[in-house]
Amino acid sequence: MKGSNDPSGGGRTRRGRRGADRGSRGGRRGDGGTATIEQLPWRQPSNPYAPVEAVSADAIEAIHEASLVILEEIGLDILSDEAKSILGAAGASLEPGGDRVRFDRGLVESVLGRAPEQFTLHARNPDRSLQVGGAWAAYCAVASAPNAADMDNGRRPGNKADFRNFVKLIQSLNVIHLSGGYTVEPTDIHPSVRHLECLSDFVTMTDKVFHAYSLGRERIRDGIEIARIARGIDDATLDREPSLMTIVNSNSPLKLDDPMCGGIIEMARRNQVVVLTPFTLAGAMAPVTLAGALAQQNAEALAGLVLSQSVNPGAPFVYGGFTSNVDMKSGAPAFGTPEYMKAALAGGQLARRYRLPYRSSNVCAANTVDAQAAYESVFSLWGAVMGGVNILKHAAGWMEGGLQASFEKMVLDADLLQMVSSFMEPIEVNDATLGLDAIREVGPGGHFFGAAHTMARYADAFYSPILSDWRNYESWQEAGSPDACAKANRVWKALLEAYEAPPLDPAIRDELDAFVARRKEEGGAPTDF
């Protein structure tokens, strides 16, 4: 494998005694070049800590009741004739000649408990399949940024070359469990066929779960078929085994457009995963108070749940929370704020109220990879993790309120995610870990560096970071005084240099190539261009 020298100061992939319970350990051939840096092996973390509750159970019920009032009295504008027909047949009230749909509380209550509380999201490599729900957490790469950025070339419009490099990093970084969409929009690929090329890249360049956009029925149908081809399964198996995820953002306030409705309908019909996420920015697209914004978020999410379960009772559905606030001086979105953290905690409470898996995000508003980027992401991350997140969107690489995907930030976030995953590992308390023999050996006034207990465990005793520099000042200065951003720059370049595509059955590749070629010949998906 190329690129075995570790620019971050390590020399190999960390092969710890923990974390090898799911899938292969880091550094094997086809594992995306992970031996280039010291990182944790591939595994999906499970959070052993009880979620933090931002509000009381009575307050959650008050938010629930307020959302039912919104759905009954105000309703949502549903800009899809098919969706309105489905909802009308299910018992919703349709406004004659209009788009307004109102949801009786009995209808809403009737669908609660239909969607699974936990399910498996299948990857083409079974070792990369994910559990969604319960205490399980899965981390997605940044998605949908219009711009890419790095220290060498600055900020630029999204393009295919940057997109493909980000995909390589998704495969190479073990702590990134799935793509959450196109890391950066490759604007040099025509929109009619962009989804075909990007989804094909996800299949051939990674072996992890991927995401398809609900931007019209053609795109989501193509995504479902590509997911089937990637796994080498038939339609019946796909319909039993969720293998594709989509994000549906309601058009806050209180609107679902036709493409989003189409995504819910098509994915629910095929038993694939819908993550319904209202974009409720308090003070702009939602009330300025957190309670009001959460009530609106909840109403929009429940409306999507009703549509999903009316199409296919039991279809997998994830409750998404993305409530934050805006800067009231400029109107710009703000992330990593105290309000965002509290909303993330409360969103998790609402998801658990409905026994649904929970989606949150690791986001920031910083324009460059600096202290603001780090602390806003840490606050976002802890709000999500302690809120009981199951799918963490934009977990690595998000910058500038979502307008930028950063190569250096992806590495920085990977380090943060590894730290969180290590924090989730329970403290082992047994005869061996209590270390009484070591304490007897060392006795009063000694040190434990050379103790047998230490020597047997030192290599994997503690978390070893990708970026943090723990040398003393003089040693750090002699090494050129490297900072975290410069180090991250070296790391992502080394990962790209060492990248190797994971194995793919030639028959699957041939079928995928044939499908993509045919759909391109047919014109792909319609556009406004």
Image: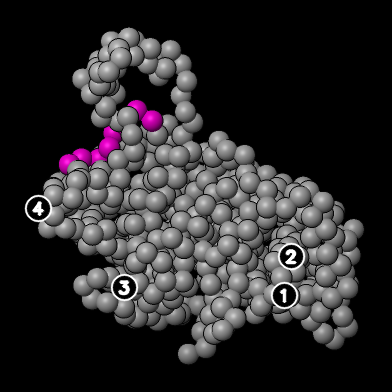
Q: Residue at x 53, y 72 (%)?
A: 334
Q: Is residue 111 above or below residue 10?
A: below
- Residue 478, label in figure: 4
Q: Is residue 231 left or right of residue 300?
A: left
Can residue 390 be seen by looking at this rendering?
no
Alpha carbon distance from label 2 to label 4:
53 Å
Residue 408 on image: x %, y %: 30, 63
Q: Which residue is mark 2?
A: 291
Can residue 102 be seen by looking at this rendering?
yes
Q: Hey, what amino acid is under mark 4?
A: Glu
Verify CB contact (< 8 Å) between mark 4 and mark 1: no
Q: Which residues are magenta?
A: 11-18
Earlier in the chain: of badge 2 and badge 3, it is 3
Q: Which residue is mark 3?
A: 149
Earlier in the chain: of badge 3 and badge 4, it is 3
Alpha carbon distance from label 2 to label 1:
8 Å
Tell me which secondary structure the magenta stretch mostly adopts. Answer: loop
Residue 272 on image: x %, y %: 60, 55
Q: Which residue is mark 1?
A: 287
Q: Is residue 341 above or below residue 151?
A: above
Earlier in the chain: of badge 1 and badge 3, it is 3
Circle 3 SS class: strand
- In reply to whether residue 267 is colored magenta, the answer given is no
Q: Hey, what amino acid is under mark 3?
A: Ala
Earlier in the chain: of badge 4 and badge 1, it is 1
Residue 119 on image: x %, y %: 61, 43
Closer mark to the observer between disc 4 and disc 1: 4
Q: Residues within 10 Å of mark 1 (few under 14, many from 20)?
A: some
Q: Hey, what amino acid is under mark 2?
A: Ala
Alpha carbon distance from label 3 to label 4:
29 Å
Circle 4 SS class: helix
Q: Residues within 10 Å of mark 4 (few under 14, many from 20)?
A: few
